[in-house]
Amino acid sequence: MRKQGNHTTPTKFITSFKYAFSGIAKVFTSEFNFRFHSVAAIAVIIAGFVLDITRTEWLFIVLAIGIVLVTEAVNSAIEKLVDLVSPQQQLLAGWIKDVAAGAVLIAAITAAVIGLLVFVPYLV
């Protein structure tokens, strides 16, 4: 199918999903931290079902998981891009990688706080 006007054809739409799922598979298979956060997310989801958390609590949990996984994926992409354009160790390249890693840490701490706020009342 061809592009018609400003509309994307179904074939291109499906192809874009294939690329997106390929990207998720690449980050999952190549990045330990992404796998770690994915396993933690599964554990949190199981805990949510076991403790029968509310719909509102699910909203916060799902958002927290999504934010952590998104920041981890973006961090991994940034690291690869920096390695591509700056193979030698440079101060600015290190700064970029550190800031991207810091974003993941902020997301993970935020998710942990949300998890505590949601789950602790069920456990006390």
Image (cartoon, helix red, strand yellow):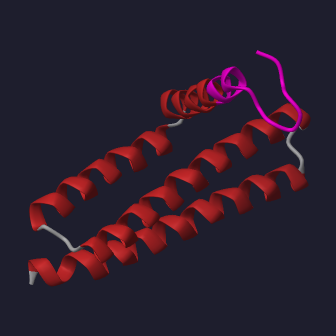
Q: Position of residue 17 (x, y in %)?
A: 60, 30
Which residue is drawn at the image coordinates 88% and 54% (left, top)?
91
Asked if one can make out residue 34 in the rendered structure from this viewpoint, the answer is yes
Q: Quadrant of the N terminus?
A: top right
* In the displayed structure image, the side of residue 17 where residue 29 appears, left or right: left
Q: Residue at x 41, y 50 (%)?
A: 37
Magenta range: 1-16
How many numbered callouts?
0
Query: Measured from the top left, where is residue 89 in percent x and y?
Result: 85, 42
The magenta stretch spans residue 8 = yes
Q: Residue furthest front?
A: 5
As displayed, is residue 33 above or below residue 71? above
Identify the image quadrant of the C terminus.
bottom left
Q: Residue furthest top?
A: 1
Q: Which of the 4 image quarters holds residue 80? A: top right
Identify which residue is drawn at 66% across, 48% down.
74
Q: Position of residue 119 (x, y in %)?
A: 21, 75
123 to 77, vertically: above or below? below
